[in-house]
């Protein structure tokens, strides 16, 4: 199963991000778009990039979301 997961999905699981799952599709799509943009600009993800993400997580897993995005950036 791991071979079928996108690096962001793998990082989500590794960082135990999901709780209720309500926001996860949007959070993951936003993270992938961010990481693709950052890669195209040939730079690393910054705290400002993460601060610009405006998806709401009603469970408040923002620290784990940020960690997962940083982890996925290393794998993409």
Image: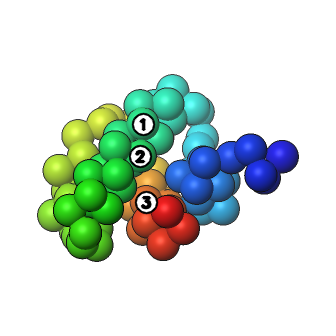
Determine crowd level at label 3: few under 14, some 14-19, many 20+ residues with C-alpha closer than 10 A. many
Q: Is residue 63 above or below residue 5?
A: below
Regarding mark 1 in the picture, which secondary structure is present there?
Answer: helix
Mark carried by residue 32: 2
Give the image location of residue 16, x and y in percent: 63, 56
User: Residue at the location (41% across, 46% down)?
Assistant: 32
Q: Could you tell whether 9 is left or right of 38 in the image?
A: right
Regarding mark 2 in the picture, which secondary structure is present there?
Answer: helix
Q: Could you tell whether 61 is left or right of 44 in the image?
A: right
Nearer mark to the viewer, of 3 and 2: 2
Q: Are marks 2 and 1 in contact (CB under 8 Å)?
A: yes
Q: Nearer the viewer, residue 5 or 58?
A: 5
What residue sits right under mark 1 in the picture?
29
User: What is the C-alpha distance between the residues marked 2 and 1?
Assistant: 5 Å
Q: Could you tell whether 72 is left or right of 46 in the image?
A: right
Give the image location of residue 31, x and y in percent: 39, 47
User: Residue at the location (49% across, 62% down)?
Assistant: 76
Give the image location of residue 56, x and y in percent: 32, 35
What residue sits right under mark 3 in the picture?
69
């Amino acid at each position: 199963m791991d071979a079928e997961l996108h690096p962001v999905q793998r990082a989500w699981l590794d960082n135990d991000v999901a709780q209720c799952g309500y926001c996860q599709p949007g959070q993951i799509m936003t993270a992938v778009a961010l990481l693709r943009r950052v890669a195209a600009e040939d730079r690393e993800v910054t705290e400002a990039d993460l601060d610009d993400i405006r998806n709401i997580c009603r469970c408040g897993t923002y620290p784990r979301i940020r960690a997962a995005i940083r982890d996925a950036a290393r794998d993409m």
